[in-house]
Every structure is written in C-alpha cells, then in structure tokens.
Image: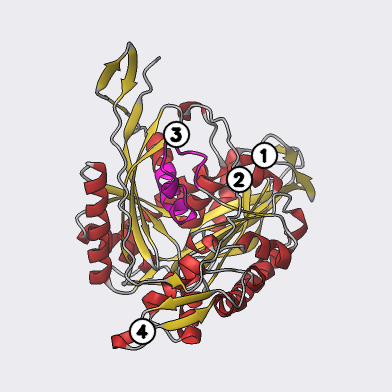
Amino acid sequence: MSEIKKYQVVVGLDIGTTKIAAIVGQMDQRGKISILGIGKSDSNGVARGEVVNIEMTVAAIKSAVADAERQSGVTISEVFVGIAGEHISSMQNNGIHSLGQPDTEVTEAHVKSMIDDMFRIAVNPGEKIIHVIPQEFMIDNNPVPRTPVGMCGSRLSANFHIITGRVAAAQNIKKCVERAGLVMKGLILEPLASSASVLSEEETEAGVALVDIGGGTTDIAIFQDNVIRHTAVIPLAGNIITEDIKTGCMVLKKQAEKLKVRFGHALPEGTSDDEIISIPGIGGRPRKEISMRNLANIINARLEEIFQHVYFEIKSSGYQKKLIAGIVITGGGSQLKHLKQFVEYHTGLSTRIGYPTEYLVKETKEELKNPIFATGVGLIIKGYDQLREEGLLKIVEEELVFEKGVEQVVVPQTVIEEEELEIELDFEEEVEETPIEQKKEVRQEAPAQQRQKKWWDKLIENTHEWFGDERVNSDNDFK
C-alpha cells in the first residue's frame, strides 16, 4: 500500500456566542481531514457574535486551546479565526463602465475597474467593504453568461453583491487572539466556512439556502450558479430559545440549556403529555416536573418566529423559486429533534441537516460529525486553501510502522472526553424515542492539489487582504 502523505497541522478557532472551540486538523493528499483534537469552553465574553469583554474572551480562548493541545499533542501557535455576527451586512448595487467605441473588447482591466469603483461607494461610519462579488454582467444591455472578457461592445454593466463588516469587531477579535498568545493567520467569514464544510458544489450550482443557527445569531447565505447571491443575519437563535425555556419552565439557565439539548422537540405533535422530565429543585426544594409537550410548545413558538425571518429573507432575495436544492440547516441549533420536518412544513422547501462529513476521514468519531463543529471544520478547510494560495502548504514527515508486511502511517489518536452533566435530568416514566434517520451522501473526492478553485477561494483571498490592512489590524480608529 502506497504511503498517504500529510500536510502540516491547521487549527480553526470558532469564537461563538455560546462556545469557543479550537479544532486541530491535518489534511492528507486525498483532501481528507483527520481531527486530532478539540477544545471547548464557555463563551461568556461574546454576545451575538461580537466580543463584548476582552478579558473573559481571552480566558475562554486559552482554556479551549489548552484542551485542544492536550488531546492532539500539538503545540498551537497559529490559528485561523472565524468572524460573524450582527455587524456583517450586505447590499446590492449596480455598476456601469463606458467602453468607448462599439467594437471595444472587454478586458480583465475593465472588470477590475468596475469592482474598484464598488469599493468606493459610501458605507456606514466605522464599516468597510469586505468584498465585492460580481453576479451578472451585461454588454449593451444584453446578458452575458459568466464572464464578459473577450466580448465587444460600447457599455459594460453589472450587478454586484457587496458584503460589509465593522472594523472595530475585527480589531477586537484580533486583540483577543494575540492576548491569548496566538498568531491570527487569517480571519474568515463564518458563513463561508460553514458552507465549505457542509455544502456540495452541486447544491451551490442548483441553488441552496444555508441556515446556520448559532447561539446568538442565525446566519443566512443563499447560493445559485456557484455564486453567493444573498446574505443576512437574524439576531435570534439558540440563546433566545434557552431564555424562553428558562422563563416558561421557571428553571435555571444551565438547566434550560440541558433541557433544550437533551429533550428539545421542534414539533409538539412528536411528544405526549404523559412524558415527564424531573429535575432537581433549587436549594433542597422538591424536584420540579416538566411536561415534554409543554417544553416542545415553548421551543416551537420561538422556532416559528426565527423561521418567519428566515423565510422572509429567502423571499426578499428573489431566489425563493430557484432553490432547487432547498435549505441546508447547520450549527448547534440544528440538533433539535424533528427540525427538518418543521422547516419543510413552514417553508415548503426540501431540507436536510448539514453535517461536516464530506472532507473528514472515514475513521472520524461519530461525535465529531456534528453540525455544531461545521464552522470549525470549515475554518480548517479554508485555512488549507489560504496556505495553498500563499504557497505555504508543505508535506510533513510521518513515522512509519510495518505490520504483517503492510506499510501503515501512524496518526495521533483523537481523544474526546465525555462532558459531565451538571444537572440530573430523567424521565419519571421511561419513554422510547424513535431516532430520525439522516441520509448521508458519500462523495468521492479528488486529490487536494487537483481540486479546482471554488467560488469561495477567490472570495477568501480578498477577505484576507482586507483584514491584513494595517488600518484594520492597528488599534487606531478606522479612518
């Protein structure tokens, strides 16, 4: 058996509203990633995707990185960090470029000039344009598929999707990472990272809406013809569901979170009034009994509000009837039971749960093939893409062992410690739960070095360049 060579280790740091996760991964020449270790810690210094307390965030980053180092046996010094939150916004704009003579041939310089003009449009104070994505081109009002380069005409026009972000948010993230003793190799938009790990090229070409339900925000990204067409951020997500359970069931916040994760149903019809959850009382008080049906009703009401916003964004994008691949849901909030059926019922679009399995090796433990790690795995994928673009991707030597004449590569084993429950949750009566079968497609991957550049590769180049701007990375106010 021929030796499968591996590239250097890459670490993704997902700074979320509810958790901070450091994921250590290593890609082989087939383009498959082995997860060597994962570290998690509670994120108390982040609200709705933005850092609100530097010291608390730094402490959480250090804790997550230390856990990841212990599991993987790798010393972490450089990380690829995700950025998201309510401050990320987008808009549409049109551009026109006069070519002069009717037989003028369109060149790359003409297209670049139009894109540069889009970077000069006015945005809100404290914000800057992250990226300008051309969508459709027209020459003399005639649509041009894909690229207009080489065509002749007198006027070139185009529609652009413009993504903006708050400069201060990027500065705060960079400051937290550096104070934790790490080097930020890249700052990547989290919806792009999630899409890289859970969406296939067929889906982005056919038309798909990615819905990432996090702790503080729900991110929406709509793709069609392998181009991102619409982005939006909804300030409602998993945390608001937890708060509703806390208020409605009169329990502690940590108990409400455990109730949501372990017993949460999106459809009340899937539960019964006879199903009872018993949790310890506070300060020696009697145990509290909560009906599964009541819990499901609380979750269902908030989900309806969240997906009303999601469906509004899909309709306002103009691509409602063009989403052949429907909706892909990922993130921690996608783990609610019967969520797939709930979304299909309320939107009329085919839906699946997005698992970050396409790029992971078959030997990956099942607990790692979880939507909660979609962003972290995507950050690793985008990290390797960035290293490849910069010419920094290199093969590392592996220790080889021989067993019965077969050459094998020694790979560090992933160790995942089971998290101990802080509260006791049990049924007063035993209830048999019917698992929902998830269809997982197995796709054959080409070697990493032979993969064609995808739409997000060029996008991340410009994003990286912007966040490399000294004005962004300095502590001075943006001017």
Between marks 3 and 4, how big is the CA–CA gap? 48 Å
Q: What's the CA distance linking mark 1 and mark 3?
A: 40 Å
How crowded pointer 2 is (Cα within 10 Å; few <14, some 14-19, many 20+) is rated as many
Q: What residue type is labelled 4?
A: Gly
Does label 2 or label 3 sit earlier along the sequence? Answer: 3
Q: Which of marks 4 and 2 is nearer the N terminus?
A: 2
Q: Is mark 2 on a helix, strand or loop?
A: helix
Where residue 461 appears, as percent x and y from the top left, is 45, 45
Residue behind mark 1: 106
Q: Residues within 10 Å of mark 1 (few under 14, many from 20)?
A: many
- Do tag 2 and tag 3 residues touch (Cβ < 8 Å)? no
Q: Can you tell which quarter of the image residue 303 is in?
A: bottom right
- Residue 32, disc: 3
Residue 208: x and y in percent read 66, 52
Q: Which numbered dot is residue 111?
A: 2
Q: Quadrant of residue 56?
A: bottom left
First along the sequence among labels 1 and 2: 1
Q: In front of the other: label 2 or label 3?
A: 3
